[in-house]
Image (cartoon, rainbow, N blue to C red):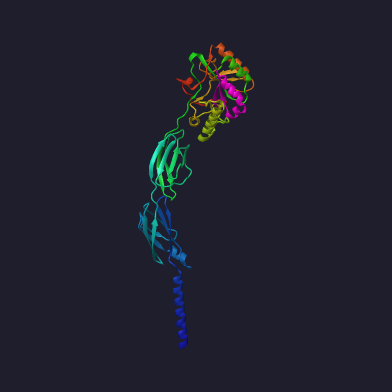
Amino acid sequence: MAGIGVLVMLGLAVAWLGQRADAAAVAAPGVAWQLHPASNTVTIRLVRGGGPSSGQILAHSRFTVSGGRGSGRRLAGGGGTARVHLRPGHTTRLAVQVSGPQPAQTTLTISTPPALRVIKSRRGRGGVVVTLSGPVRRQPHRLCGLNTVSFPAARQVAVARSPQVCRARLTVTARDGEQAVVPVAVPALPTIPLYAFASPAGRAVYITVDDGWTPSGQVLAIMRSTHLPVTAFLIARAARQDLPYWRAFVRAGGTAGDHTVSHPDLTRLTLGQATSQWGQARLALGHWLGRVPDMGRPPYGAFDPTVQAAAYRGGLTVLVGWSATVDGNRIQTWDGRPLAPGEIVLLHWVPGLGHQLVRLLALIQARHLRPMPLTPASFAGISPQQRSLSGD
């Protein structure tokens, strides 16, 4: 009997030791944290410890955070989080006290990067350049619709000018995650005016011919024999096909204007695309014909502030519309009345252009009008056009 009693006592002791071993195998909940440099906050939560009962222990645990800004909150462990604000550029010690089935205490030491600061802001012809205290991430941004944000240097961000005035707040992120909100005020780009009429002084009218796909020897002969001033608004791709003709055209007294590279509807393009259409054609025509154009005509007569700002960026000084057109044997003015002084007449380099020009000159003579050279000075004192025109 004594032996049996000993065995029972041994069994109870083993069971008690086993329970102590199981309890020891269940660790207290752990503490996990994540720093958010953009807001200078740290998020703290409890995570499961070890052992089969860790999930239940976590669910019944609570924790309190001390230190930092806005700490001291007591939260549930099962999915609860504490969000603590920290000072940028400092090291902060946070005490986390866990209460519940398995109490514990731990200390977190967290360092935050220094705040991102604006060192200086400089306004130039192209827009606004902001210099910051540290390197920034090259993230895509767009402000006020068309304003493009770029990064000219590691610590700089630039906001380009657009057709509209831009006043906005730009959020910039440093490489270490810190953020700064930068107020920007960017003036609008200058715009180039478009004129549908020119000076009527001396009963002047102005002959303009668009595109350039079909050069006319007859037109060149008329220009040479009568010293007729003609302005050709040339598509660069069309002009390139017959450069000897256009050089002869200029020698005969003709003026070459910019009608873009490929004749798109510029109102459907971005500011950058429209600028390229104006600027590339202007430089190409200047290289080929010896004089860089200062006048341009938007294809289809379609224009808006973006097209006008693109013309400014492309180097033009004036945009030219029209008030009268020649289509076949028909001459049509903007108001249906006879051709009058100051009218800008639109023709096209098409087969039969020579005959159209002869007919137009006869009408001009009958109306006692004088063909005059078209230059930017021709628009002095004339009101710009405010709406789009139709045509091509």
Image coordinates of residue 195 in percent, x first then y, are 49, 23
Residue 292 painted magenta? no
Q: Quadrant of residue 250?
A: top right
Quarter of the image for the C terminus: give it. top right
In the depicted view, which residue is nearer to us: 253 or 266? 253
Residue pictured at 42% horizontal, 51% vertical: 37
Image coordinates of residue 294 in percent, x first then y, are 50, 26
376 is higher (above) or lower (below) than 168? above
Q: Looking at the image, can residue 329 be seen?
A: no
149 is higher (above) or lower (below) than 374? below
Q: Looking at the image, can residue 245 be seen?
A: yes
Residue 245 painted magenta? yes
325 is higher (above) or lower (below) than 267? above
Residue pictured at 59% horizontal, 13% vertical: 362
Image coordinates of residue 265 in percent, x first then y, are 55, 31
77 is higher (above) or lower (below) than 157? below
In the depicted view, which residue is nearer to us: 201 or 316? 316
Image coordinates of residue 5 in percent, x first then y, are 45, 85
Question: Total label count?
Answer: 0
What range of the chain is rendered magenta?
A: 229-258
* Outermost residue, bottom side: 1
Q: Quadrant of residue 28?
A: bottom left
Residue pictured at 44% horizontal, 71% vertical: 24
